[in-house]
Amino acid sequence: MQYIVAGAGPAGVVACETIRKLSPDASITLIGAEPEPPYSRMAIPYLLSEKIAEQGTYLRKTSGYYQQLNIKHLQQRVNSIDASASQLKLDNGESLNFDRLLLATGATPINPPIPGVDMEGVRHCWTLDDAREIAARAKSGSSVVLMGAGFIGCIILESLVKRGVSLTVVERGDRMVPRMMDDTAGNMLKQWCEDKGVRVLTSHSVTAIEAGEPLSVVLDSGESLSADLVISATGVRSNIDYLQDSGIETDQGILVNGYLQTSHSAIYAAGDVAQGRDFSTGEFTVQAIQPTAVEHGRVAATNMVQDNTLEHQGSLNMNVLDTLGLISTSFGQWMGVTGGDSICMVDRERYKYLNLQFKDDVLVGISSLGHTENIGVARGLIRGKVSLGQWKARLQKNPERLMEAWLACSVGVA
């Protein structure tokens, strides 16, 4: 059996390992478009903070790891796929046949429609090549403009501050991490960053980037910011362009069923490119986070080998951020549900925020700032769809009693 995995990120690597475990004699080919060994994009900020070397970003650090598992690693880009012929074509013109194919080709940063966004000195923070360029320009005392204060932007933010740059963040939304935090929490995070010396401009957008030394970043307010480096972190989109005329159905990502199988029975999808099931809603959406990619890779690979024996129950939406020492989290339906109840505890002076969302007597979502204890317990309550009974009212009086609720309702300890 010839298995091909297109995409050498977390989903692809875990898929190859799973296939090898389940099928010791199978032929496995892993295809990755970048010249480096498979690595984690989430490790790039640690590289920029100089906590790790480039090798520290690698997903598997043992020398010769893929060869030891008899996994052939090709550093090429998939150019096109002919699903009916069970064949894919690489950028170098080579064609490969497959019995089973996993598409784990990830996502690509979105370039906002801004004049000058393609010029030298403007980068994404997505690849190791990006990281090298950022490290070369983001020297102590240099001026950096970061476009976007979403999840990716906030991950990058801390590493830039640690490099000693003068940083300005420009965010179109009215708060930081708008897809993870409500207005109260998002603006508490903004105040935290400003107290640490970062200028944060919410409800602002960049209208142009003009050439020069330094660059000139023009805002919709008319203000112009000088920048030795501009970093764009304004979102990503699934890599599906190469699937045109492939016979594989796509939407925002690749459409899959509960087994992560595409519209072609021999082809599966996983990670940022797959429109998989959301645990909380049951809907099929793209969840571009690494835990989902890892889960997808394992489930899809199992079904590729064992003919759809493992149904994917859905990925729980979850985000955890460390922004200049302030931990923020969101799990599940943190924004609440129609007809649901909630409780919110706010301590602005101590940068403490905890918001619980309920549907009937079940915890369905949580968001927090400055709380690290028992957050994993909240995730367990959400994932287990645990009936809280009288503990719902107790949590509404004191949302910090999550551990007691877990012990009483899940373990049976009063």
Image: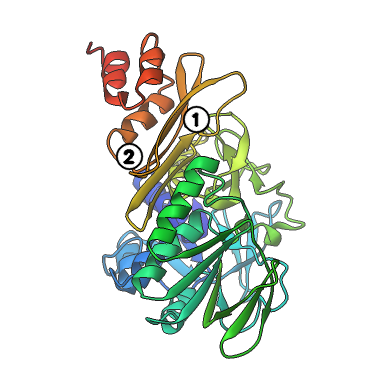
- Number of marks: 2
Residue type (three-letter) at the residue carrying disc 2: His
Q: Secondary structure at mark 2?
A: loop
Q: CA distance from mark 2 to mark 1?
A: 28 Å
- The quadrant in which the C terminus is found is top left
**In x, y percent, where is residue 143?**
48, 79
Q: Residue at x 40, y 13 (%)?
A: 393
> Alpha-carbon neighbours of circle 1 within 10 Å: few (<14), some, or many (≥20)?
some
Q: Quadrant of residue 38?
A: bottom left
Q: Say the numbered circle drawn on residue 402.
A: none
Outermost residue to the right = 245
Q: Nearer the viewer, mark 2 or mark 1?
A: 2
Q: Is residue 99 visible?
A: no
Q: Is residue 352 above or below residue 81?
A: above
* Camera-nearest residue between 206 and 383: 206
Which tag, 2 or 1, sits closer to the chain's start?
1
Residue that appears at 53% across and 50% down? 288
Above or below: residue 337 compared with residue 354 = above
Q: Residue at x 68, y 65 (%)?
A: 112
Residue 239 visible? The answer is yes
Residue annotated with mark 2: 371
Q: Quadrant of residue 372?
A: top left
- Front in this rendered view, residue 250 or 138: 138
Which residue is label 1 attached to?
313
- Give the residue drawn at x 52%, y 60%: 7
Q: Secondary structure at mark 1?
A: loop
Please rate how many residues cluster around mark 2, counting C-alpha atoms within 10 Å: few if below 14, some from 14 to 19, many from 20: some
Left or right, 179 with reference to 61: right
Q: Which of the 4 quarters of the picture holds residue 266? A: top right
Where residue 9 appears, x then y in whole percent? Answer: 46, 59
* Amino acid tagged 1: Gln
x then y, percent, for residue 404: 26, 20
